[in-house]
Image: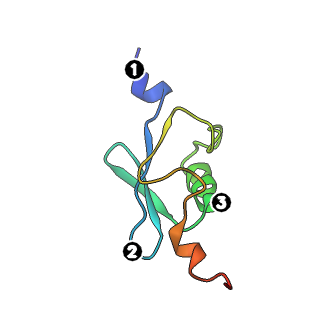
Amino acid sequence: MDNLTQHPHIVVHAPALDGSRRVTEGDVTLGLASHLDDVVEILRLADLDRIEVEESDLIEWQGGGPEDWPGLTEHEDA
């Protein structure tokens, strides 16, 4: 039984300077996310939409969790 087929390992990488986060499965880049909703859509397009994005052990959040999108805060009014 191949565990990688049954349990994909998704990584949401640390935010880039613009706040975007690369989403990968193994060595494959699935997309670039600027918000949590983007991660959900990227996984849907990769037929991985059964994964609970904010709670799944299949997703490794690097450089912050699902609530960390530093590029968004610079647009908010002080």
Name the residue beneath numbered marker 1.
2
- Few, some or many C-alpha atoms within 10 Å of disc 3 (few <14, some 14-19, many ≥20)? few
Residue lying at 39% horizontally and 74% vertically, measured from the top left? 17
In the depicted structure, whether residue 70 falls above or below residue 5 = below
Q: Secondary structure at mark 1?
A: loop
Q: Is residue 65 left or right of residue 40?
A: left
Name the residue beneath numbered marker 3.
37
Q: Residue furthest top?
A: 1
Residue lying at 50% horizontally and 34% vertically, measured from the top left? 58
In space, the residues marked 1 and 2 are separated at their CA atoms by 37 Å
Q: Tag 2: residue type?
A: Leu
**Tag 3 and tag 2, C-beta contact below 8 Å:** no
Q: In front: mark 1 or mark 2?
A: 2
Q: Residue furthest left?
A: 27
Q: Position of residue 45 (x, y in %)?
A: 58, 53
Q: In front: mark 1 or mark 3?
A: 3
